[in-house]
């Protein structure tokens, strides 16, 4: 009796998982225009650029590396959302007036960025204390200019 019940639940889950694959979020990488880049507005030291590229680029640039699991629902929905939302707040390839480099320092100092879920699969994106200091020193200096 119990075994049959479990089998039904499993079947429903498998069918739901398969059906979910039909909803494929857009995984975009809009064209990059150097004119709109963060670098066009601020001088970014090479060290800082390397840190931002490594730890933030997948969600805050137009050059997202979409991993294989970004094709598998429901993870695909979450990732596409993170990238869309991330780019809206801060995009180093499309740095708009509403964005502020001050927020960059704030977010990494309190450890809100990179997102915890991202660090789980990308431990190399974790920032060291020295890297946080380097980025914050840059935002302070760049804003003072
Ligand atoms: C896995 C995706 C992801 C990564 C990696 C990531 N972010 Fe974010 N970031 C987001 C999302 C989603 C938001 C918008 C929602 C939020 O604030 O939590 C965001 C918001 C921000 C904001 C705006 C905060 C605000 O209050 O407006 C800044 C600044 C930021 N991130 C900086 C960074 C920096 C710097 C890094 C790298 C050290 C980084 N992020 C790495 C996804 C990411």
Image (tube, rainbow, N blue to C red):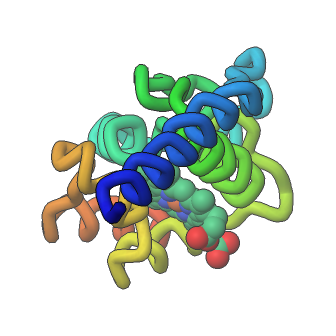
Does residue 39 appear in the picture of this structure? Answer: no
Q: Residue at x 68, y 66 (%)?
A: 100
The quarter of the rendered structure image containing the N terminus is: bottom left
Q: Residue at x 85, y 57 (%)?
A: 97
Q: Position of residue 112 (x, y in %)?
A: 42, 75
Question: Which residue occupies the extreme front position in the image?
Answer: 1
Residue 62 as seen in the image, left or right of residue 96 = left
Does residue 52 appear in the picture of this structure? Answer: yes
Q: Position of residue 130 (x, y in %)?
A: 14, 64
Residue 133 as seen in the image, left or right of residue 143 = left
Residue nearest the observer in this picture, 8 or 126: 8
Q: Position of residue 116 (x, y in %)?
A: 34, 65
Q: Residue at x 68, y 32 (%)?
A: 19
Q: Position of residue 94 (x, y in %)?
A: 75, 38
Residue nearest the observer in this picture, 108 or 36: 108
Question: Which residue occupies the extreme top position in the image?
Answer: 31
Question: Which residue occupies the extreme bottom position in the image?
Answer: 110
Name the quarter showing ligand 1: bottom right
State whether residue 108 is above or below residue 7. Answer: below
In the rendered image, which quarter is residue 89 located in?
A: bottom right
Q: Residue at x 34, y 76 (%)?
A: 111
The quarter of the rendered structure image containing the C terminus is: bottom right
């Amino acid at each position: 009796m119990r075994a049959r019940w479990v089998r039904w639940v499993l079947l429903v889950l498998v069918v739901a998982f398969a059906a979910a694959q039909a909803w494929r979020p857009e995984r975009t990488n809009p064209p990059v225009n150097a004119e709109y880049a963060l670098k066009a507005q601020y001088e970014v030291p090479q060290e800082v650029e390397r840190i931002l590229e490594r730890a933030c680029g997948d969600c805050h640039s137009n050059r997202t590396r979409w991993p294989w699991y970004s094709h598998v629902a429901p993870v695909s929905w979450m990732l596409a959302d993170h990238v869309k939302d991330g780019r809206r707040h801060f995009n180093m390839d499309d740095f708009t007036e509403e964005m502020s480099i001050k927020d960059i320092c704030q977010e990494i100092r309190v450890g809100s960025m990179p997102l915890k879920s991202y660090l789980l699969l990308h431990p190399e994106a974790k920032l060291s204390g020295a890297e946080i200091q380097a980025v914050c020193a840059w935002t302070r200096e760049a804003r003072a200019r």
